[in-house]
Amino acid sequence: MSGRAYAGTGILPGFFEPCTLLKRVDADTRDGQGGYGGTWEDGEAFEAKIRKETIAPHEAVLAGRQDLGERYIVTIPAAMALHYQDVFRRESDGQTFRVTSHSTDSAAPAVSTIQIAKVSAERWEVPQ
């Protein structure tokens, strides 16, 4: 990746950690329980900063959400697009996350020196 495409590498050393996008294969396979199965395999490797989002319990109630699990803000290179329902794994501990937004909604403007984008994500267990 070119320095211009991702200037954050030199400015923020040690900020990002290795992750791997997971791709669902055989998604058309019925699971015998009224849903669809399939398996997951490793896709593109990328780097991200994953930060746990803090939300006060009263804010969850005001938002009408009692089921707020662990939520995260994920910062990625702007050239790496993540979309709603994408799944990825943090390599340091094998934890998987499911994206709950689109990176194109929060990408830095083209004139920005640091080309990053952010998505929201939740902890997620890959179905077996």
Image (cartoon, helix red, strand yellow):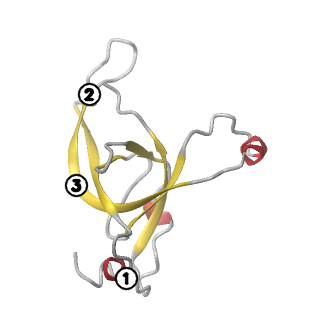
Kind of residue indicated by mark 1: Ile
**What residue would you read off at disc 2?**
38
Q: Which quadrant would residue 33 be assigned to in this image?
A: top left
Give the percent coordinates (x, y) of residue 40. 25, 35
Q: Work out how far the residue at label 3 is from the one at label 1, CA to CA, in angstroms.
A: 24 Å
Q: Work out how far the residue at label 3 is from the one at label 2, CA to CA, in angstroms.
A: 19 Å
- Among the two numbered marks 3 and 2 on one chain, the one whose residue lies closer to the N terminus: 2
Image mark for residue 44: 3
- Other residues around mark 1 within 10 Å, as few (<14) / some (14–19) / many (≥20): few
Residues marked 3 and 1 touching at CB (< 8 Å): no
Residue mark closest to the camera, 1 vs 2: 1
Image mark for residue 11: 1
Residues marked 1 and 2 touching at CB (< 8 Å): no
Give the percent coordinates (x, y) of residue 4. 29, 85
Give the percent coordinates (x, y) of residue 7. 33, 82
Name the residue located 74 percent from the left edge and 40 percent from the top edge.
64
Residue mark closest to the camera, 3 vs 1: 1
Q: Which quadrant would residue 48 be assigned to in this image?
A: bottom left
- Other residues around mark 3 within 10 Å, as few (<14) / some (14–19) / many (≥20): few
